[in-house]
Amino acid sequence: MIQQNILKAKTFINQSVARVRDVSFSRTFIDSIREIPQIDKKMTQAKTPAWVLFAREALRTPRTIGTGWASSVQLARAIANFVPLTESGLVVELGGGTGVVTETLLKQGIAPERLVSIEQSANLADCLRRRCPQARIIKGDALHLCNLLGDDSRRVSTIVSGLPFRSLPHAIGHGIIKQIDEALPDHGLFIQFTYDLSGRPMFLPPHFKRISHKTIWANLPPARVDVYQSTP
Ligand SMILES: C[S@@+](CC[C@H](N)C(=O)[O-])C[C@H]1O[C@@H](n2cnc3c(N)ncnc32)[C@H](O)[C@@H]1O
């Protein structure tokens, strides 16, 4: 897996540099990366590999993506294993990205009608729709979670988040947490992964108790999945 990821990174950088060279020798690398959507006009999004889409979005908006790589299947499985299968409430995913966690949730047995994935990047939301056509994908900002869900905001039982809270601006992170708190009922679960293995707790209102966690060493970089429960 590590070697595969390194190979993907090298290929991506090589392809990007080659494109930059073709367009203009005088532009800076970053400026040229921003131009890639124009260069790619002829290449349909559907043909662009998911990891390229993800890396491109990461270069365009690093603070909202938070990492250069999508989660590994091992991390996605660890997240999905914490989601109760037997409940009827909605499972809402925040920051679905290219859909590795979304797809794993479905494979692990979450019924498609229970799953809603919210992703703010239009390109990644399209990628999610192609990868998981049976799930409900909403292109939108988690800062407006309850509005985006409408009446369904009263049916949420679990929220799974891939949002990079540590790199998002504080005001946005706090605003999203308020929305999560509003949408989750008592005993509802909030599942979040982090690359910060120091054990520092995430900022959450005090009635959120961490009830479980698991470190996934096989992910690059290693990540910890934390499970919080909203207590009455
Ligand atoms: C670290 S990536 C995780 C992607 C995927 N869940 C995974 O595990 O590979 C974070 C994702 O959150 C999305 N995101 C960031 N801020 C967001 C927001 N305010 N609302 C919805 N999605 C957001 C980004 O576009 C990105 O796809």
Image (cartoon, grey):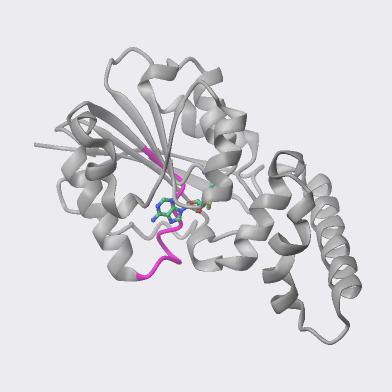
Which image quarter holds the C terminus? top left
**Measured from the top left, where is residue 223 in percent x and y?**
55, 49
Which image quarter holds the N terminus? top right
Count up the numbered dots: 0
As drawn, is 196 to the left or to the right of 201? Answer: right
Q: Which residues are magenta?
A: 160-169
Look at 48% across and 14% down and name the residue there: 109
Q: Nearer the viewer, residue 219 or 35?
A: 35
**Measured from the top left, where is residue 165 in percent x and y?**
40, 59
**Measured from the top left, where is residue 51 in percent x and y?**
71, 47
Q: Is residue 130 magenta?
A: no
Look at 52% across and 56% down and name the residue there: 195
Look at 79% across and 84% down and name the residue there: 27
Q: Is residue 162 magenta?
A: yes
Q: Nearer the viewer, residue 212 or 183?
A: 183
Residue 59, compared with residue 6, is above or below; it is: below
Residue at the extreme front? 42
As drawn, is 183 to the left or to the right of 224? Answer: left
User: Which picture quadrant has residue 62?
Assistant: bottom right
Residue at the extreme bottom? 26
As drawn, is 3 to the left or to the right of 87? Answer: right
Q: Nearer the viewer, residue 94 or 134?
A: 134
Residue at the extreme left? 232
**Measured from the top left, where is residue 199 in percent x and y?**
41, 56
The overriding secondary structure of the stretch rendered in magenta is: loop
User: Which picture quadrant has residue 175?
Assistant: bottom left
Look at 42% across and 64% down and name the residue there: 166
As drawn, is 11 to the left or to the right of 205? Answer: right
